[in-house]
Image (cartoon, helix red, strand yellow):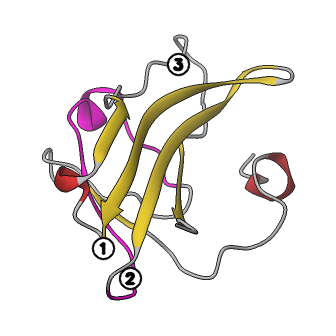
Amino acid sequence: MEKIIPDVVDTVPNNIIKIHYPSGVDVNLGNELTPLSVKDEPTVQWPTEEGEYYTLVMTDPDVGEMSEIKHWLVVNIPGSDVSNGETLAGYRGSGPPKDALHRYIFLVYKQSG
């Protein structure tokens, strides 16, 4: 089911993002989490380079064939301090149809400028 590569990204990312929800659950490379446990914005950490800015994306690629839904988008994040980034799309927890599993993918990109 995961098949994040090549469904969402073409290559294996260099690092793993740490994601922790206020409910006490962590994202762990494909573990199943309930919508209730992921309803609130998580804390997200990743390796950073001093003075660099990053973009954080959370997406659901399983909405339908050839479509996905943006669940969170924050740009101009100094280091991994998401709270000081510019939120373009506020966090929206998961909401798959009943009895359906969806993949929720977190991606972080170092900005080029």
The amino acid type of the residue labelled 2 equals Thr
Are the two marked residues, 2 and 3, in contact with CB atoms closer than 8 angstroms? no
The amino acid type of the residue labelled 1 equals Gly
Residue 35 is one of the magenta-drawn residues: yes
Spatial CA distance of label 2 from label 3 is: 32 Å
56 left or right of 69?
A: left
Q: Is residue 93 above or below residue 23?
A: above
The residue range painted magenta reads 31-50
| Sequence-first tag of 2 and 3 | 2
Q: Is residue 64 above or below residue 40?
A: above
Q: How far across and how far down the image is residue 38, in percent?
A: 29, 37
Residue 73 is one of the magenta-drawn residues: no
Q: Secondary structure under badge 2?
A: loop
Q: How far across and how far down the image is residue 2, in percent?
A: 71, 51
The amino acid type of the residue labelled 3 equals Pro
Q: Residue at x 16, y 53 (%)?
A: 24
The nearer-to-camera label among 1 and 3 is 1
- What is the number of the mark on residue 96? 3
Q: Secondary structure under badge 3?
A: loop
60 left or right of 45?
A: right
21 left or right of 49?
A: left
Residue labelled with disc 1: 79
Give the residue at the far top of this rendering. Answer: 98
Q: Secondary structure under badge 1?
A: loop
- Main secondary-structure element of the magenta-colored stretch: loop
